[in-house]
Amino acid sequence: MPSGATADEMLLAFDRKREHRLLVLMPLFDEASKMRRQVVETMRILDQSGVDCFCPDLPGCNESLAPHSEQTLSGWRDAAARAAAHVEATHVLGVRSGCLAAPAELHGWTYEPVKPRSVLSRLARAEQISAREANETVTAKQLMAEGYEKGVTLAGWSFGPDLVNELATSELASSPHRLPITQEEVGGSPLWLRAEPAFDPAQAKALAVIIVERLELP
Amino acid sequence: MTAETATAEPTGPSRSAIDTTLRAILRDVLALEESQVEAFDADTGLFGHLPELDSMAVAGLFTEMEDRLDIVIDDDDVDGEMLETYGGLLAFAEAKTVES
């Protein structure tokens, strides 16, 4: 939490006290709901393949009651690091913008990571388009300027100024500990692009197989 | 297989690469079959005609167009007309590609 205090959040866990313990970080914002089922089904297959999986709710996300407008990227990184320590994670899988919260020192994978700035510009553009539908004129530039100064609501998500600034200025940190997983490796069309949430069993299986192979499980 | 078949002319004019890419993006966004997206013509209605193509989906569509077509879409470019039909969107993408 911004004050430095901690709060409890929900954690989806497949825990059988096995050697490999994977922390899974869902995408942030709109892609969280689009990808949730796909990611959970992937965790289920990993569980059946011998990998313990844990997916924490970051503060302000999913079932969390913490106000979204008070969240920051650094706060999410801190929360993810605490979750990793709590479950004794051995690896991390970041999915899309979830990669932005991955604890620096944890080994693992980034599945199609997205640049922080493009997360923000896509949401600003969605807000611009929906304003246009309501016959209002606002530009993405104006929305961003408002965001920097006092925070802004983009496509239903309220962003505090700190989060806007962090997303606008931070780079996608590459870590020597984490290797990318591309959509080409997983196959099929990217589910986060879909207008409606979707589930593709073949992609869930493929992603799980990639992780199992890289963990060198039998 | 005869030599004649192997050298036969294509049955129709070849589609531009932009057209092919744009259809592929729409297929991904709208979760359509290849055949459905192939059937799009210049008058096929998009934004305001397809309920699943909401503002968030359109924003994702633009981001993909920027990535896959290597173009930049400005705030001012986003108007109702270019989103209304497939033909409008294709013409916009072609004009942007020439610009860049």
Image: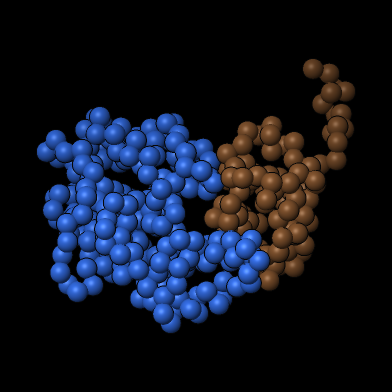
Chain colours: A blue, B brown
Residue lying at the far bottom of the rendered structure: A149
User: Is A180 situated left or right of A47 in this image?
Assistant: right
Asked if residue B26 is positioned above or below residue A152 in the image, the reply reads above
Residue B40 placement: quadrant:
top right
Asked if residue A170 is positioned above or below residue A210 in the image, the reply reads below
Asked if residue A43 is positioned above or below residue A148 in the image, the reply reads above
User: Is A42 situated left or right of A8 in this image?
Assistant: right
- Percent across and percent down for residue B16 are 77, 48
Task: Write the residue at 36% across / 42% down.
Answer: A39
Q: Locate the C terminus of chain B by quadrant.
A: bottom right
Task: State how many labels appear.
Answer: 0
- Percent across and percent down for residue A145 are 50, 79
User: Is B84 situated left or right of B51 in this image?
Assistant: right
Q: Locate the N terminus of chain B by quadrant.
A: top right
Task: Write the residue at 21% across / 48% down.
Answer: A11
Task: Write the residue at 41% across / 57% down.
Answer: A29
Is any atom of residue A166 visible in this view?
no
Q: Nearer the viewer, residue A10 or A183?
A: A10
Task: Write the residue at 70% across / 56% down.
Answer: B83
- Percent across and percent down for residue B20 are 71, 45
- Percent across and percent down for residue A183 are 47, 45
Is any atom of residue A188 visible in this view?
yes
Residue lying at the far top of the rendered structure: B1
